[in-house]
Every structure is written in C-alpha cells, then in structure tokens.
Amino acid sequence: MDIVEFLSARIKEDEAAARRLLLDRSVSESGQWYERRLLLECEAKKRLIHIVESARQSALASMVSDPDGDGQWIPQSIGWMAESLNALALPYYDHPDFEQGWLR
C-alpha cells in the first residue's frame, strides 16, 4: 500500500465516523461542530493529495518526455511532494498499516 492509498483509506474512515456521529442525536452541539469540521478537514486533505499527486505525475512525465532537458528541479520537487504526503500521514502513526519511513 502506498501512502496515497493509505491516506485515502484513513480519510474515508474519518468521514464515515464523522457522518455516523452527526446522525447521533446524543452528540452535543459542540460535538456536531467538531464532526462538521472533521468532514471539512477530510475534504481539504483530499484536495491537497490531489494537487500533490497531479504535480508529481507532471514532474514524472516531464522526466520521461525530456530525459536530456533541464529537469534539475524535478527530483527535489518530488522529494517535497513526498514530504507533504508524509506530513498528512502523521496523525495516523498508530495505524497498523502506517509505515515508519513516513515519519522522515
């Protein structure tokens, strides 16, 4: 499982939990506020993952289409993209599928 698959699965779990709690009439108003906020945070994470993945695919395509071009920026930018995804995985460090290498 790569980090994007891992993050996507965790986000889906978070969304499902938040929706369940929003349907629970015993949840306080502040609890409902938190769950609505969690749903927005999930959406923000999904958008960020999409942005990073699109940029990574573009960088890789540039490397393949023009291997002799001036692509010195590509490896460094791919590294930044990986670090961004690793940062998004941090809250899930205790999940059994979490890879310790993502803590770097």
Image: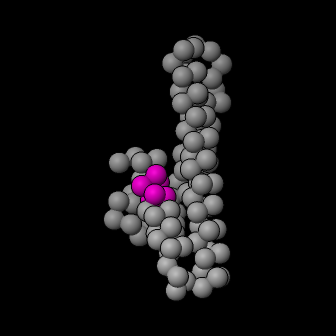
Across and down, in percent, residue 31 comes to 60, 80
Q: Relative to residue 6, is residue 26 drawn left or right?
A: right
Is residue 104 something that shows in the picture? no
Vertical order, 84 against 31 (above or below): above
From which residue to which does the magenta span run?
7-12
Q: Relative to residue 90, is residue 5 drawn left or right?
A: left
Q: Nearer the viewer, residue 87 or 39?
A: 39
* Residue at x 58%, y 72% (from the top left corner): 35
Across and down, in percent, residue 48 comes to 62, 48
Q: Quadrant of residue 68?
A: top right
Across and down, in percent, residue 44 comes to 63, 54
Across and down, in percent, residue 29 comes to 64, 82
Q: Nearer the viewer, residue 92 or 10?
A: 10
Vertical order, 11 against 75 (above or below): below
Q: Relative to residue 14, is residue 32 drawn left or right?
A: right
* Residue at x 57%, y 14% (from the top left corner): 66
Q: Nearer the viewer, residue 10 or 75?
A: 10
Dominant SS type (magenta): helix
Magenta stretch: includes residue 9: yes
Magenta stretch: includes residue 21: no
Vertical order, 83 against 73 (above or below): below
